[in-house]
Amino acid sequence: MADQLLEFAQQLINGLAQGSIYALIALGYTMVFGVLRFINFAHGDVFMLGAFAGLYTAPKLLALFGGGPSLPGATAVLLVAMLICAAIGILIEKLCYRPLRDRPRLTVLITAIGVSLFLENAGQYAFGVDPQSFPEIIVDRAIEIPETWGAISALTITIGQILVVGVTLFLLLVLRFVVLHTRLGMAMRALSFNPVAASLMGVNTDVVISFTFGLGSALAGAAGILTSIQQPSIDPLMGINIGLKAFVAAVLGGIGNIPGAALGGILIGVLEALVVGYINPTYRDALVFAVLILILIVKPSGLLGKTEREKV
Amino acid sequence: MATRAKTLLATTLLACAVLSIFAGKINPYYYDILISIGINIILATSLNLVNGYTGQFSLGHAGFMAVGAYASAWLSLTFGYILGTHSAATTATFLGALTVGGLIAGLAGLAVGIPSLRLRGDYLAIVTLGFNEIIKGVIQNAEPLGAQRGLGGMMQHTNFFWTFTFAALTVYVVLTLVHSTYGSGFLAVRDDEIAAEAMGINTTKYKVLAFVIGAFFAGVAGGLYAHFKQFVHPEGFNFLRSVDIVVMVILGGMGSTIGVCIAAVLLTILPEVLRALAHLPWLPEWLRPIVENRMILYSLLLIILMIARPQGLFSGIGLKRQKT
């Protein structure tokens, strides 16, 4: 019995760490949907670019902080990757989505698919097709839980997992502050509530949309670094699968709803860990799509979302 | 309209029959491209019914193609010799396998169409993509279908005649359907779903019908593919294959059958041309991988097309709708 409980707790821990990554990426989907009402298909690939930004800048940044893996070095890598991704996100919006602002949604959707395919294939061209090993920016090892803690000592928790959950929590709090307590955040909420009224009240729509893209992409970049700490290698197509799952997480939580995206991410991560642990690892991808289809049939507005009526 | 389409169909079929006499003499490389063109015309035209005429953006056409390919391959492997080995008998089995494969794909289309009724636009695209992945996942785990190893050993029944006969049939069915009184419903659903519903059009029925017919022809195309290559593999029907078909529809112009056919021909030839271009001696070394990787070009094409000419390159060519 105790063993089973421990096993379950272990899966929860693994799921929580993976779910944090999904949550960070899902936030980007949900915020962009909030202000522009469209799904930024390329968001998963921005996550991939974050990982590669880390790969290329890490050796130089780590050298600034003494060379080896260190906490300040890792923080620097994280921040730089977030900045690079924010810039890329803003650029994508300016070049590809802005000219289509008032076009049918299908047109924008196709463009987003195009951008996604471009980033994946240009990434394969620029970074090479083969997986590359990510430099060690922080020592990731299992934490020893003392024997005296009894049965709990059988659990395995890695530094990477703690870091992922901790950084995610911190970024969520920062995001909450930005959205609720700054002028730009207020403008963001106004825009997602009613774009016409917001622009009539003097909200500069373009600036707010750029800001939203930057914010979401920065979170995706952070997720890229946090993923790379835990897994041995990164490749230009790593964003497809994780991006799709994060999207499902955003829909599960109610797309356009920021706390919903965080909740959805954690739920998807835990669910996936449970399927891998108890059923069959080969079903983990199919399961996520099954969840998506189920949610869209049963409650399309998601767990925390509001139902929107379409007006004629 | 209907008579013109019939004449078109008859001429194409006749041309198929005549040309197929010479098909045996063509260089195998060009023959391969020719058959691929035919299969892609079927795929693009049938997807156009869903994406173009009905306005339901599906990203999972390769999934239906996979269903048809595997179903017909399994059927002809299992029942291939029941009618005997006479050429008429094997052709009958081949056609039977193609039809049943198409019907099973149509059933899969029904399964996708029903949940997708509540979805539109972006959601539908992702759900169909998900179905594509689920179908691939099921095949990868299905031992009787060869799982990860793929399925091979079918006879090569697909030839020039059958490929282009089915291509002409697909074009004929889609064209006459959307230009009929009954088929106006598809266009109504696309143009304004709410208005269509208010006018008493059963939008649900039209959407499902579009999915089922589209999936049926995709299944037939899959069957032709399986009996041409004599080997099918789950990875051959992944998301990127779906994107290939979607690019054909968008480039040709959503809702323009002739445009989509032209695009299918061009985009089948394009990778081969690019491959030849990549070996040109004067091409700078850094450009070669870009030229050879058609996906970079396709993705840029999609973005630029959407910004500059969202109606596609060849829309407005061909049969016009009659004013009544």
Image: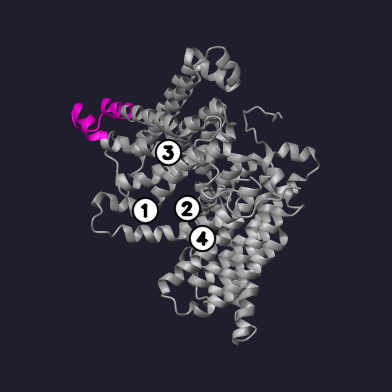
Earlier along the polypeptide chain: callout 4 or callout 1? 4
Contact (Cβ within 8 Å) of mark 3 with mark 2 = no
The residue under label 2 is which amino acid type? Leu
Task: Look at mark 1 in the image and give the residue it sits on.
Answer: B293
Circles 3 and 4: CB atoms closer than 8 Å: no
Residue under label 3: A155
A62 drawn magenta: yes
Task: Specify start and end residues of the magenta stretch as a single range.
Answer: A57-79
Q: Nearer the viewer, mark 2 or mark 4?
A: 2
The local crowd at label 3, few if under 14, some if 14 to 19, many if 20 or more residues have their Cα within 10 Å, is: some
- How far apart are the alpha carbons under marks 4 and 1? 26 Å
Residue toward you, B155 or B10: B10
**Residue under numbered circle 4:** B140
Query: Mark 2 or 1, which is nearer the eye?
Result: 1
Establish whether labels 3 and 4 are both on one chain.
no
Front position in the image: B220 or B23:
B23
Q: Is label 4 in contact with label 1 (beta carbons under 8 Å)?
A: no
Q: Is residue B223 visible?
A: yes
Find residue B91 and report its horizontal and vertical position in percent.
61, 79
The quadrant holding residue A200 is top right
Rendering coords of residue A73 (x, y %): 26, 28
Residue type marked 1:
Asn
Q: Chain of mark 1?
A: B
**x, y (%) of residue A199?**
55, 16
Is A120 contained in the magenta span? no
Q: Say which mark, if any, is on residue B240.
A: 2
Q: Mark 4 or mark 1, which is nearer to you? A: 1
Callout 4, which amino acid? Gln
B38 sits to left or right of A56: right
